[in-house]
Image (cartoon, rainbow, N blue to C red):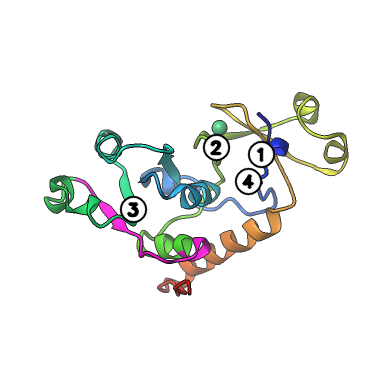
Amino acid sequence: MNAENDKDALRLPCDAPALDCDANEALRVACDAMCGGLARWLRVLGVNTAYVRDIEDSALVRQALAERRVVLSSDRKLFERRVFTTGELAGLFIPVGLRLADQVRFVAGRLKLPVGFPRCTLCNGELEPVGRAAVADVVPARSLIWVREFYRCRECRQVYWEGTHWRRIGALRAEIVDMRAAGSAPETTPQK
Ligand SMILES: [Zn+2]
């Protein structure tokens, strides 16, 4: 599969600064089955984010325990489980009704997310730069001409390049970086 065929795939903001690349190594999160959109954005921000579509809560908890991940969910009942009430497992409740960008701001503020180099939005793998020739068979000819940098996921081999969504992604990344710098709490707007 390549990014051009996946209209929902977020494109990599190649010009975005890679900040705190090592600082976010420690923080790992696991999104529940309902938080797929949030998971993709967190991966764009460079956060090590586990997300499995349709994952059962019990499997999610097992994975989070095994990999020491903070669980993100809008399901209050999930956090009533003993592993959370005893503090064995950390979790963050995402308020219901937040728009996606506000979910990202909320999580970034609460977890004081460092912004790192984007990870693969599809599988959470690390991206590595690759040469133009290596991606010529998957990147459309027009993009091959004007795009300067290409990246490939080490895990699923998905190829990324500067695409049509990169400005929007870059803007939110920059906002989270600024929020970190200012140390301010995020402002969130409940969805009407
Ligand atoms: Zn991947």
Q: Position of residue 7 (x, y in %)?
A: 67, 44
Q: What amino acid does circle 3 point to?
A: Ser
The magenta span reads: 89-102
Q: With respect to residue 37, does 190 lie above or below?
A: below
**Could you say which disc has been placed on residue 6 in the image?**
1
Q: Give the vertical position of 38 relative to 175 (above or below).
A: above
- Residue in the picture at 27% in, 52% down: 91
The amino acid at mark 4 is Asp
- Give whichever of discs 3 and 1 has the lower sequence position: 1
Residue 91 inside the magenta-drawn segment: yes
Pointer 4 residue: 8
Point out which mark residue 122 bears.
2
Residue type at the position of mark 1: Asp
- Pair 2/4: label in front: 4
Asked whether 180 or 168 is in front, the reply is: 168
Front one among 108 and 83: 83
Q: Provide residue 92's location: percent of width, then percent of height.
A: 30, 57
Tag 1 and tag 2, C-beta contact below 8 Å = yes
The answer to whether marks 1 and 4 mark residues whose Cβ atoms lie closer than 8 Å is yes
Residue on which disc 3 sits: 73
Which amino acid type is marked by label 2? Leu
Residue 56 on the magenta span? no
Q: In this view, does 89 lie to the left or right of 71?
A: left
Height in image: 159 above or below 78?
Answer: above
Element type at marker 4? Answer: loop
| Residue 26, x across and y down, in percent | 36, 44
Q: Report the side of 70 relative to 42 (left or right).
A: left
Determine if the C-beta at disc 2 is less than 8 A from ligand 1. yes
